[in-house]
Amino acid sequence: MNESSERTDKRMELGRILFLLGAFATHAFVGYALVRGCTDVDPRLGLAFGLLPDGDFLFPADWGWPFVHRGLTHTPLFAVGLLAGLYLASRNRSVALAGGLAIGSHLAIDSLSPMGIRWLFPLRTAWNPSPGLAVHSPAATALLWTAALGILAFRAIQRRSHDREPTTDHKQEHDDKQPTPTPDATTELE
């Protein structure tokens, strides 16, 4: 192998690593934003469950199907099983919902990519109705991050306005301190 092809291989490998880091960060951030924006559960659950399907990168390559990237861990069956386990462990529907938002966002994003996911696994392993979008391209990644930031901003504004509203008890105290109106001159004459 000559020096030029070695540089090309290293650039390609670096490009692949950066691509994967961007995809991992996007899945984690979208999961975080959805859990933070839509639930009161610790949003770190969104980070973990947003990344969880890509745990398949840790499987040895010689294990083969379904332990490959976009295999078992990228199926609704895996997600449902995982969420059932999460619910049984926590006995908390909000926690299971939060996990579902995060892992569901990962599956939804990846289902749009050229590789897609196996929606009907184990019934069908070949069917893949993907539109073939470049969901981890720089433009798509920027769009996903913008949407996630929008969710976080909306939730922050919503919480800030909620924190400013007086509670019912505080409002009652405030109302009790108001002076009672005195009759004015026109009502006294009547």
Image (tube, helix red, strand yellow):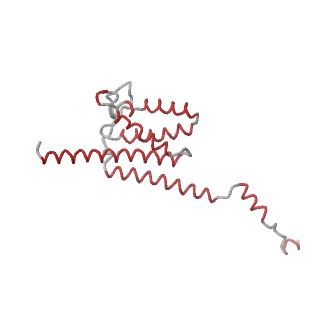
Quadrant where the N terminus sits is: top left
The residue shown at (38%, 24%) is: 123
Quarter of the picture holding the C terminus: bottom right
Question: Of all residues shown, which one is farthest toward the bottom?
Answer: 185
Image spot of residue 77 (x, y percent): 43, 29
Can you tell which quarter of the image residue 135 is in?
top left
| Residue found at the very far right of the displayed protein | 189
Q: Is residue 89 left or right of residue 105?
A: right
Q: Nearer the viewer, residue 159 or 47?
A: 47
Viewer-proximal residue among 103 and 18: 18
**Residue 8: x, y in percent?**
17, 47
Which residue is pictured at 78% across the width and 66% down the height? 178
Image location of residue 129, percent across then percent down: 34, 35
**Residue 71, located in which quarter of the rendered image?**
top left
Seen from the viewer's position, the closer of residues 175 and 81 is 81
Choose between 48 and 100: the one closer to the eye: 48
Location of residue 107 (image quadrant): top left
